[in-house]
């Protein structure tokens, strides 16, 4: 990178850090209504930061929940438009006593900036604002048109943005020829049409190895409750007479996996696009040794679907996990009660090609079919998202990879992640544009947990990457052409 | 019953009720050390009540925990001695908002006395003190010798009493010929030797039908923990790589029962004395209709070991229940974590002839054998007790049945209970004396739960029963002879 940029970043580093710390001080927790004012405060902070960066049409778009922040810079006629997405809401802080410094009192220790949201996603989205600000300051213009869309409900499933994108998607279906004229919105009207969607909300696979995320898994799940007797029963007074809801649910959950590690729900693997052999081989080579990973995680041995490397199991294969099981009172070993109910949360990570609704249906039917006699079953669906994988041949990925190579002074690896970013497939559906997951987190950032942080190495490298990104022309709109996404196998 | 007794009970009913309410006001909770002073207060209350009743040698026997209260009346030389056992400690009150009136503010509503301990066991043991008081007041003497032993640790497994009885038991084994000279104790020395043990701490099977409890089931159990990764893992970041502790434990628990309802743990039925065919038939006739019982309990159908009537399953067959299962956070359907551990409490009710330690060993070995790969297992034993069944031919039961018939004006049924009273087999072992379970509770008393109460019908009937009991001669000591207990099948 040219020394002009380096010099700029050096001289503004203190200010950048302080501004991010101001942003991180706002407890913009979307899961708890008592922080609604903090969500607005964060949106207002972003409006000011967008304006200072030189973005235009800066506005808060009112929704039924937290406002969206929109801004754009559209001064390269004929050039492609990049829609940058991020979120300013954060997870609840968890247990205060597990934080070394308070969650909303940012502090830099040993090269890491600690605060809730430092990595997910305030810190990462903030880098885009500072990159645009720097490029416009140094060069007066960006290499392409930019739209920024920052939401405040990502941690609760993006209800408003989803509605907005689905409106765009439905309109597109109605008139596929008139994409560029689409405008959507709730109170305000915002045109989200773009040629590329750019998101920084993912981690590298390892520190010191830049990575571009080329796929995410889908998601579906059920909340399951097994109901037994109307009241808890003493096992001395009733043991032997009734089906125990805990036992019934345990038996049902046991039937979800075979002993070998396959998911035993009929239809669970339906729709899955298998990886090409070459991709399997790459993942197998990239996979850490099973023994190393097992001892790192503190388990006697890894466990999973036979015949696949750890990274293929994690990134490409559908998996099922029981996240919680609650019945009776584990603190009470004296009262020997048969509880009136038992409850479990089951979520599935899905592979490319799978329909989350159909997989949830299959799980639902399976659980209904195997419910033992003597209890009743109640279920509710959880959030659903489709898996997505990029077409590695698409030129937007080469463009992003070059920026990463400049920013981190090392060629990036192409990786995927085992988690889900529901908004990715929503963007693909709504805008028919390729999505670039150019994230700067590390797997050790403790996102969603206590002591969340962002490494300052990632902060600096990310900003350098984005300075390059916003200054480098994208291929012409015509070359960005048709996109390949999760719906196209092995494209 | 003679009108003299009726008249006495009528004219002292108000005072009896008020004294019991004073006793119930003391929050003598043994499970919580902050109530230690209340335990002493309850013991002191009992000392005074024993003295007022005319009992002698009244004393508190210090133990490592709550004091025992001892008193006796030994003025019929050559007659048998009855050891009356009860407990003054109570369960914690549970949720205050589920009590109609506060747990330790006794209140009579619609013929029921509501308070923690009203039925279990303060109310029932109190009847013995008032019966002795009445008989000594009216007649000047009892029909046999009496020792009272009231403990304050029943709800936490009777550690001190158990130690004391096992000391007696060991001494007996050392010198079987010298039983009458045995004295035991910790700081004080108390001679517990007796010809009959009398306990009022059990319920009738139905209201309006007096019942004598002729058997209790045994108990054993394990606290089981399955340990997975060192930290909770995000299912997006690790789903497909590790054995999920919840799933592992659910699979282990599923293996404990066959689909038909048999316990599938090898050795689980070992040692069991089957009921005689005639006993099975009686239980089958006494059993409520399965459909009625199911709708009363609010379940679609009953469930249990095939081939046995509900009462035989409940009273005579060993059963296994998972009382609690906890893993992950059931309130959290968003974070999709794989928890680091899952825990369950398993308890077994055992039949006559079974050794609780051997059954717990069998369960332990089974769980070890079926622990899936990729997790570690930790277990701890819970309290153990042997089952017990009376020999219905023994004359002490006819004596008790006559008193019940007088007290409740109806012939009693012989029943058992599915629960466990660990101290029963401890008394049998230590004293070689038959145990009489002459309880006055009802199954609807809500013992251990909120709104515990004692029906005043049971209060009055129980007191009438005991007035008759303490005035009626027992068979001569020589006729009480050898006892038959749980160790003797179908005796």
Image: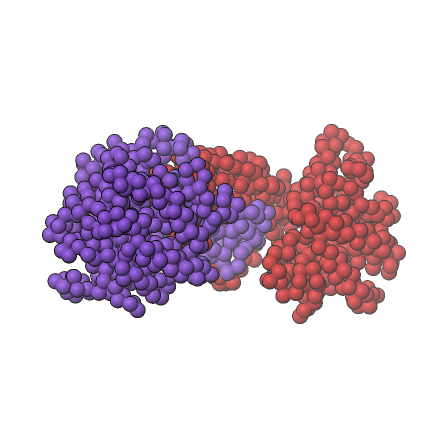
Chain colours: A purple, B red
Q: Is residue A353 visible?
A: no
Residue drawn where x is 49% and y is 40% of the image: B225
> In the rendered view, would you say A208 is above or below B476?
above
Q: Give whichever of A300, B394 is nearer the camera.
A: A300
Q: Give whichever of A43, A342 is nearer the camera.
A: A43
Dividing the image into 4 quarters, which one contains the N terminus of chain B? bottom right
Dividing the image into 4 quarters, which one contains the C terminus of chain B? top right
Horizontal side, residue B288 vs residue A117: left or right = right
Residue drawn where x is 28% and y is 55% of the image: A54
Measured from the top left, where is residue A377 in percent x and y?
40, 57
Measured from the top left, where is residue B59 in percent x and y?
83, 46
> In the rendered view, would you say A189 is above or below A124?
below
Measured from the top left, where is residue B216 in percent x and y?
62, 48
Horizontal side, residue B138 vs residue A468: left or right = right
Residue drawn where x is 62% and y is 60% of the image: B96
Q: Is residue B116 visible?
A: yes
Please, which residue is most extreme toward the bottom here?
B110
Q: Give whichever of B64, A435 is nearer the camera.
A: A435
Q: Quadrant of residue B135?
A: bottom right
Please, which residue is most extreme toward the left here?
A478
Residue drawn where x is 52% and y is 63% of the image: B296
Measured from the top left, where is residue B228 in percent x and y?
43, 38
């Amino acid at each position: 990178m040219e020394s002009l940029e380096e010099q700029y970043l050096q001289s503004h580093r203190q200010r950048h850090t302080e501004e991010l710390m101001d942003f991180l001080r706002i407890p913009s927790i979307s899961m708890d209504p008592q922080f609604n004012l903090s969500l607005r405060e964060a949106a207002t902070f972003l409006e000011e930061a967008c304006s200072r960066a030189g973005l235009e049409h800066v506005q808060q778009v009112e929704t039924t929940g937290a406002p969206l922040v929109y801004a754009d810079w559209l001064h390269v006629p004929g050039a492609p438009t990049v829609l940058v997405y991020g979120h300013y809401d954060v997870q609840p802080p968890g247990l205060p006593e597990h934080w070394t410094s308070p969650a909303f009192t940012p502090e830099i220790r040993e090269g890491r900036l600690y605060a809730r949201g430092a990595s997910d996603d305030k810190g990462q989205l903030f880098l885009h604002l500072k990159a645009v600000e720097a490029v416009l300051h140094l060069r007066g213009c960006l290499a392409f048109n930019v739209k920024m869309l920052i939401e405040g409900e990502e941690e609760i499933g993006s209800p408003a943005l989803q509605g907005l994108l689905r409106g765009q998607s439905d309109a597109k279906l109605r008139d596929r020829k008139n994409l560029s004229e689409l405008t959507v919105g709730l109170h305000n009207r915002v045109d989200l049409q773009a040629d590329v969607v750019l998101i920084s909300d993912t981690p590298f696979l390892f520190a010191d190895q830049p990575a571009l995320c080329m796929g995410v898994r889908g998601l579906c799940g059920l909340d399951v409750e097994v109901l037994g007797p109307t009241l808890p029963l003493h096992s001395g007074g009733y043991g032997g007479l009734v089906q125990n809801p805990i036992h019934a649910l345990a038996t049902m959950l046991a039937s979800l996996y075979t002993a070998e590690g396959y998911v035993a729900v009929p239809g669970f693997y339906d729709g899955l696009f298998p990886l090409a052999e070459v991709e399997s081989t790459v993942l197998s080579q990239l996979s850490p040794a099973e023994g190393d990973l097992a001892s790192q995680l503190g388990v006697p041995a890894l466990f999973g679907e036979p015949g696949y490397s750890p990274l293929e199991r994690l990134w490409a294969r559908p998996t099922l996990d029981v996240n919680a099981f609650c019945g009776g009172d584990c603190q009470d070993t004296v009262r020997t009660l048969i509880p009136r109910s038992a409850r479990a949360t089951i979520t599935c990570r899905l592979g490319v090609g799978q329909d989350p609704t159909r997989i949830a249906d299959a799980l639902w039917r399976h659980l209904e079919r195997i419910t033992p006699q003597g209890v009743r079953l109640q279920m509710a669906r959880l959030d659903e998202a489709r898996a997505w994988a990029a077409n590695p041949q698409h030129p937007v990925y080469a463009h992003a990879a070059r920026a990463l190579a400049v920013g981190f002074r090392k060629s990036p690896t192409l990786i995927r992640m085992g988690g889900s970013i529901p908004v990715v497939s929503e963007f693909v559906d709504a805008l028919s544009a390729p999505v670039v997951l150019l994230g700067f987190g590390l797997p050790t950032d403790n996102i969603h947990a206590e002591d969340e942080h962002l490494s300052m190495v990632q902060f600096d490298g990310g900003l350098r990457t984005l300075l390059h990104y916003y200054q480098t022309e994208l291929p012409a709109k015509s070359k960005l052409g048709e996109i390949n996404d999760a719906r196209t196998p092995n494209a």
